[in-house]
Amino acid sequence: MTTEYVHLPDETTGKTVTRKVDFAAGRRAFVKCLGVGVASTALLGTGGVKEAAAQAVTDADILNFALNLEDLEAEFYLRAATGQGLSDAEIGGGVGTLGPVSGGRKVTFDTDAIRNYAFEIAAEERQHVQFLRNALGSARVNRPALDLSNAFNIAASFAGLGSTFDAYANETNFLLASFIFEDVGVSAYLGAAPLISDKSILSAAGGLLAAEAYHAGTIRTVLYSRGLYSQAQAISNARDNFDGPSDDDDGIGTVTTANTSLTNPANGLAFARTTTEVLRIVYLNGDARPTGFFPNGLNGKIR
């Protein structure tokens, strides 16, 4: 079966409408049918789209790749902010193995502003999950197994920050753990812009990218205000080592120079990553081999 039904908000009325989609009809036919919500194809980037074509993946595969990553962020932020993750209704009912979440607990925040940031980001990441699940309908994948405990130990070890790292011990650790995810999300979504010709689709893509960029900017700014330059640089170096030979990452700056937006110093533009580069980071190895935050891999074809 290549025909599925997707459920999306109508751009004019805001009401949910059901549309019939042939996922085998090709990328352009699919995104034109969606009309909104295709920002997640940006996770591929220009090089990533070539990867997808080589693997004969469908647009549903691309959106499910995005859903896996949004599951990770939503579960991390929700558990850190509230002590509880996504509900049963937000994780299953699709294809692929429904996995458990290891680790994650409520952070004791000492600063009201940091607590408020955590709740805001958690709520928006949950909305991203809901949006993608609704868009995919019965084609959506289930939440995969997630490691929100030992994966941080692995990341810290590679970054040279010690063999153990409790992301939930205090608000500083929470901010550093958040820094691992946010810049990756921005660079992953960026690739959609040059691939989209329909202005309404470009607008939808820009909305999701902008939300992730706001999150990343908030985390980087707060880390800078706390003088956590060396820790952030260590995490940035680890991401750069994982994703490949290109130098497309950087820390938050130094005591004399701020770098609260991750951009190419040559042109002031943000970086883009392909699916393989993203997988190398979330799997915490340069081989894009399932481990790290996704111990059993992502659900779906792009894994």
Image (cartoon, rainbow, N blue to C red):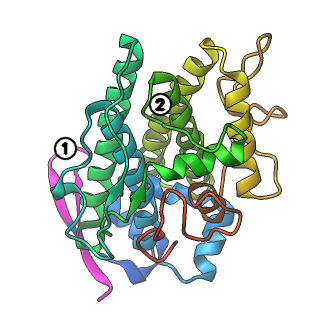
**Taking 44 as reference, is 227 above or below it?**
above
Direction bottom: furthest residue: 1
- Write down the quadrant of residue 160 in the picture: top right
Q: Is residue 298 left or right of residue 102?
A: right
Give, as a three-letter code, the residue at label 1.
Answer: Gly
Q: Is residue 297 left or right of residue 105?
A: right
- Write down the quadrant of residue 53 in the picture: bottom right
Q: Nearer the viewer, residue 213 or 152?
A: 152
| Total number of numbered discs in the rendering | 2
Which callout, 1 or 2, points at the residue further toward the start of the chain?
Answer: 1
Queried whether the magenta region covers residue 229, the answer comes back as no
Q: Which residue is mark 1?
A: 14
**Taking 19 as reference, is 121 above or below it?**
above
Q: Looking at the picture, how far across and down is residue 89, in whole percent?
A: 16, 57
> At numbered mark 1, what does the secondary structure look like: helix, strand or loop?
loop
Residue at x 60% of width, y 57% of height: 278
Q: Nearer the viewer, residue 247 or 134?
A: 247
Queried whether the magenta region covers residue 5, the answer comes back as yes
Residue at x 41% of width, y 83% of height: 24
Q: Which residue is mark 2?
A: 174
Range of magenta residues? 1-18
Q: Is residue 148 left or right of residue 7?
A: right
Residue at x 24% of width, y 41% of height: 84
Give, as a three-letter code, the residue at label 2.
Answer: Phe
Q: Is residue 190 visible?
A: no
Mark identifier at residue 63: none
Q: Looking at the picture, how far across and down is residue 230, in whole percent?
A: 73, 26
Q: Is residue 82 visible?
A: yes
Q: Nearer the viewer, mark 1 or mark 2?
A: 2
Q: Quadrant of the N terminus?
A: bottom left
> At numbered mark 2, what does the secondary structure look like: helix, strand or loop?
helix
